[in-house]
Image (cartoon, rainbow, N blue to C red):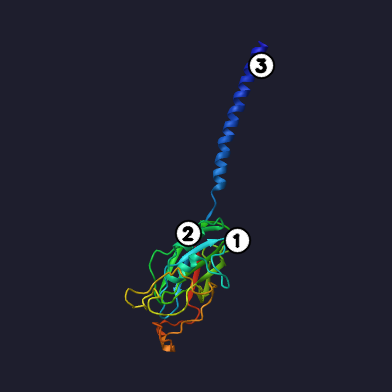
Amino acid sequence: MKRQHYSKLALLTATLVTTSMLSACFHNKDDDDDMQEMPKVSYQITVTNLTNGQPFTPLAAILHNASYQAWRAGTAAGSGLEKLAEGGDTTEFLATADTDANVAGTQASANGPFGPGSSESVTVTVDSADDLRLSLATMLANTNDAFTGIDDIVIGDLAVGDKREVMAPAYDAGTEANSEAGGTIPGPADTTMGGGEGYNAATETGRVITVHPGIVSQDDGLATSILTEAQRWQNPVAKIVIERLQ
């Protein structure tokens, strides 16, 4: 009888241990799933065009940490920025960012170019991070390779409902000569047959990003320029407002 009692006790104990282990396994899996669900944050980025005669192309926004650099004045422009600054194409600029582990999310605005006095917005939702930063770019369409935007602005410290405002100048991407000649500008100011070109694979200058000196124009005596005083600007050219929504 004693042997039978111990045998039954051993079997019951083994069953309880096995059941407990299985329960623990399922519980741990749920815990792992919960740990992987990071809280989300959402930001609305609004750009207002402050120029008199420069349409802005669609916005390209990148949310990232301090280890990522989308562009920076004084450094060489990447090929993605070159295509954006010469033709307004955001595709490569954002696709390159999307492959980097330091980038939390990217977004291009859905609408086309927007003119002086108008605004365009994008909303980006990403995992929460204290070190979250924003970089953004948009082309001044009636130029060879001018763009505006912000580089590496900290936004991770914003509380829900908080806003951060930045006044941005125009930058020269340094990838195309500022000839202002017919056939070289993608914006509506270029009325030559077939319109002006956008991106040109030939890099004509030193590629270094600088604050743009402004156009020269035919009104200033540049006979080959198709631009006039109407396309001139004074810095800043854009007001950028970042608001945390969530």
Q: What secondary structure is found at the residue carrying circle 3?
A: helix
- Numbered disc in front, either 3 or 1: 1
Inspect the image, locate mark 3, and give the three-letter code of the amino acid beneath it. Answer: Tyr
Q: Are marks 1 and 2 in contact (CB under 8 Å)?
A: no
Residue plotted at (44% across, 64% down): 90
Mark sitting earlier along the chain (3/1):
3
Q: Which residue is mark 1?
A: 67
Is residue 100 left or right of 111 when viewed as pictured?
right
Q: Which mark is residue 45?
A: none
Q: Nearer the viewer, residue 176 or 14?
A: 176
Give me the C-alpha separation between circle 2 and circle 3: 67 Å
Q: Are marks 2 and 3 in contact (CB under 8 Å)?
A: no
Q: Which residue is mark 3?
A: 6
Q: Which mark is residue 95?
A: 2
Q: What secondary structure is found at the residue carrying circle 2?
A: helix
Give me the C-alpha separation between circle 3 and circle 1: 64 Å
Residue plotted at (42% across, 64% down): 109
Mark sitting earlier along the chain (2/3):
3
Inspect the image, locate mark 1, and give the three-letter code of the amino acid beneath it. Answer: Ser
Question: Percent x, y for residue 81?
Answer: 49, 67
Point out the residue furthest to the top here. 1
Q: Residues within 10 Å of mark 2 (few under 14, many from 20)?
A: few
Q: Residues within 10 Å of mark 3 (few under 14, many from 20)?
A: few
Q: What secondary structure is found at the residue carrying circle 1?
A: loop
Q: Nearer the viewer, residue 118 or 179?
A: 179
Mark sitting earlier along the chain (1/2):
1
Question: Percent x, y for residue 240?
Answer: 49, 71
Quadrant in the picture for residue 34: top right
Q: Nearer the viewer, residue 206 or 38?
A: 206
